[in-house]
């Protein structure tokens, strides 16, 4: 954005002649038009008129209960038609509702472990109240992977390449409760990615996901499921 500055000769700070007044008014008018165009441009970049209902939906499927919590698979679907998530990829965060810890993860990792000093022997993967999770990189050892992981957080859009518009990781959560009545939905869920930001709708408990076995002869069901959605700002 550039401005053309108007100069007014033979004007003083205390007295303006009529020509200077006119030039000054024109300058202010031009400045306001330029600023208005810039704001409109920023708003247009953040809103995709061709895909007003595009969103990123996250499923949080509880697959099994553990002695102090549960194991869940978290899956992100980029239901935007045209907007991909490019390098350095997505960053997912939330705030635990209670005093949960993450015992282990597959397909992703937290950026910080936090203070786990109260645990002796087997330390959790993360003890932070508000963990930040990132995808693992391509080439991650196979025993640390799950399906749809390990792409460095890069995701295609659903319309362009649906097979690569999905990203998943597995998380083992402790100190969380061991039934649907005692488990609490994570709060303040945030999603960050290159480009304009996202606004998150509240997570809610919905009907559990059904899973088909590899031989397609058996269907199992998640024990619980949380579902937040993110919309482009």
Image: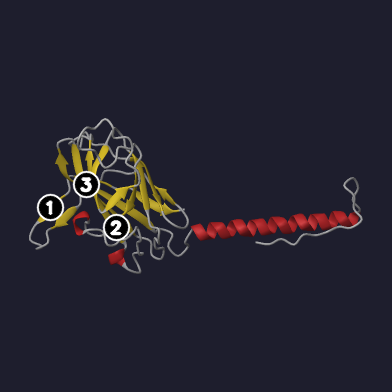
Residue, disc 3: 72
Label 3 secondary element: strand
Q: Evaluate if marks 1 and 3 touch, with contact meaning CB atoms under 8 Å apart.
A: no
Q: Position of residue 60 (x, y in %)?
A: 26, 48
Which residue is at a point 11% across and 55% down the rendered structure image?
219
Label 1 secondary element: strand
Task: Give neighbour class at mark 1: few <14, some 14-19, many 20+ (Cα, 10 Å).
Answer: few
Report the side of 52 relative to 66 (left or right).
Answer: right
Task: Give neighbour class at mark 2: few <14, some 14-19, many 20+ (Cα, 10 Å).
Answer: many
Residue, disc 2: 167
Residue, disc 1: 220
Q: Position of residue 222 (x, y in %)?
A: 17, 48
Q: CA distance from mark 2 to mark 3?
A: 14 Å
Q: Evaluate if marks 2 and 3 touch, with contact meaning CB atoms under 8 Å apart.
A: no
Q: Quadrant of residue 112?
A: top left
Which residue is at a point 27% across and 55% down the rendered structure image?
168
Q: Position of residue 162 (x, y in %)?
A: 30, 66
Mark 2 or mark 3, which has the lower sequence index?
3
Which residue is at a point 52% across and 60% down the rendered structure image?
45
Mark 1 or mark 2, which has the lower sequence index?
2
Q: CA distance from mark 1 to mark 2?
A: 21 Å
Q: Quadrant of residue 66?
A: top left
Residue most extreme to the left:
217
Q: CA distance from mark 1 to mark 3?
A: 14 Å
Where residue 56 is drawn, which disc sits there? none
Which residue is at a point 86% across and 57% down the rendered structure image?
8
């Amino acid at each position: 954005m550039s401005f053309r500055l108007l100069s007014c000769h033979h004007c003083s700070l205390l007295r303006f002649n009529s020509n200077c007044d006119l030039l000054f008014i024109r300058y202010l008018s031009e400045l306001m038009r330029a600023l208005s165009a810039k704001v409109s441009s920023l708003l247009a970049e953040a809103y995709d008129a061709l895909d007003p209902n595009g969103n990123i939906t996250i499923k949080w499927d509880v697959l099994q209960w553990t002695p102090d919590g549960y194991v869940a698979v978290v899956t992100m679907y980029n239901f935007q038609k045209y907007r991909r998530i490019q390098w350095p990829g997505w960053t997912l965060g939330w705030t635990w509702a209670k005093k949960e810890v993450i015992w282990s993860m597959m397909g992703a990792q937290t950026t910080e472990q936090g203070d786990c000093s109260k645990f002796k022997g087997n330390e959790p993967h993360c003890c932070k109240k508000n963990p930040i999770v990132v995808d693992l990189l391509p080439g991650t050892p196979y025993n640390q992977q799950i399906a749809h992981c390990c792409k460095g957080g890069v995701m295609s859009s659903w319309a362009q390449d649906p097979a690569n518009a999905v990203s998943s990781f597995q998380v083992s959560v402790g100190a969380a409760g061991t039934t649907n009545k005692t488990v609490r939905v994570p709060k303040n869920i945030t999603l960050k990615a290159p480009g304009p930001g996202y606004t998150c709708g509240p997570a809610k408990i919905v009907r559990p996901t059904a899973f088909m076995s590899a031989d397609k002869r058996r269907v199992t069901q998640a024990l619980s499921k949380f579902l937040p959605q993110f919309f482009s700002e």
